[in-house]
Image: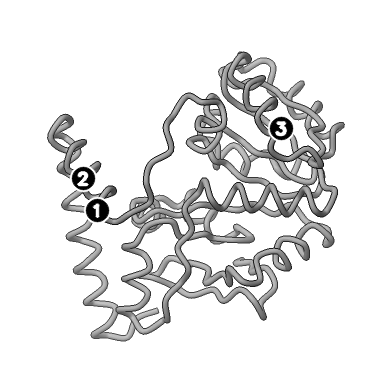
């Protein structure tokens, strides 16, 4: 069953059969505020074009996307595909900017945050940076990633006791998004988001990439030249283009 947050401000469309949310940037504060005030275990998902294509072929990931409270498009290909299919133009969010705005909303709402992931030293760095940037945000707990599997029950218990308004999951949590999907029923109500690259930026482990079309293209070409096997992604993009044409001609949903 698909879920949609605040249907008057979030419209769920489909791009080649995969749900994507058209989320009003203007009303994002109200959208998040409503989710915080309503009972529910709400997973937010960042969706790239590669993720969208993965959702077509992987049943578990498809269920994860369908059950997400917000499906947030992060790559231009999804936006262009939606426009090509006549579904309007979803707002594309850069994950770092989205998380910064999300944390600002949590701070204004006097909400709480739990950090899960990274190595212990880097996690402490994230906590310090967040306390300096969002002094009104209540950090109610943290647990490093790369943990022994036998500790998972203890971690779930710790998160549940802290009862955060939001759980932010980073590197070192196996299949972060799927970990949330598989375990959120054991936790309390709140928002759940896996954003490993964003947490690495917070930890000063990764430089923030410029969010421009040319810069993204240059990075993609550079990565393909140094990692030739990544050229197989071209086939994914080609298949996506073919699917867009098929869905448009036959008016498929």
Could you say where residue 13 lies in the image, as x and y percent from the top left?
A: 48, 75
The mark found on residue 214 in the picture is 1
Disc 2 secondary structure class: helix
Which residue was labeled with disc 3? 132
Picture quadrant of residue 34: bottom right
Label 1, label 3: how far apart the Cα atoms are: 33 Å
The residue lying furthest to the front in this view is: 132
Could you say where residue 212 lies in the image, as x and y percent from the top left?
A: 33, 54
Task: Check the image and report above or below for 29 versus 161.
Answer: below
Q: In this orientation, which residue lies closer to the viewer: 171 or 135? A: 135
Q: Which mark sits nearer the N-terminus, 1 or 3?
A: 3
Task: Please tell me whether mark 2 or mark 3 is closer to you in this view.
Answer: 3
The quarter of the picture where the N terminus appears is bottom right
Q: In this orientation, which residue lies closer to the viewer: 1 or 107? A: 107
197 displayed left or right of 57: right
Which residue was labeled with disc 2? 218
Disc 1 secondary structure class: helix
Task: Check the image and report above or below for 60 versus 141.
Answer: below
């Amino acid at each position: 069953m698909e879920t949609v947050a605040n249907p008057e401000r979030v419209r769920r469309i489909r791009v080649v059969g995969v749900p994507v949310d058209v989320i009003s940037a203007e009303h994002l504060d109200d959208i998040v505020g409503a989710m915080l005030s309503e009972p529910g275990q709400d997973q937010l998902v960042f969706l790239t074009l590669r993720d969208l294509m993965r959702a077509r072929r992987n049943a578990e990931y498809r269920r994860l996307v369908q059950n997400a409270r917000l499906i947030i498009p992060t790559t231009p290909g999804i936006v262009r595909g939606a426009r090509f299919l006549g579904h309007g133009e979803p707002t594309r969010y850069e994950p770092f900017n989205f998380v910064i705005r999300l944390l600002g909303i949590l701070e204004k709402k006097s909400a709480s945050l739990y950090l899960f992931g990274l190595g212990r030293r880097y996690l402490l760095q994230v906590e310090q940076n967040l306390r300096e940037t969002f002094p009104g945000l209540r950090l109610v707990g943290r647990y490093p990633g790369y943990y022994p599997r036998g500790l998972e029950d203890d971690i779930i218990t710790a998160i549940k006791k802290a009862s955060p308004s939001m759980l932010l999951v980073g590197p070192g949590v196996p299949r972060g998004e799927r970990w949330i999907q598989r375990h959120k029923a054991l936790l309390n109500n709140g928002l759940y988001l896996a954003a490993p690259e964003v947490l690495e930026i917070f930890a000063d482990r990764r430089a923030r990439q410029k969010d421009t079309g040319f810069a993204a293209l240059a990075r993609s070409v550079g990565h393909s030249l140094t990692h030739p096997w990544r050229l197989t992604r071209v086939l994914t993009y080609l298949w996506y283009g073919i699917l867009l044409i098929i869905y448009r001609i036959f008016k498929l949903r």
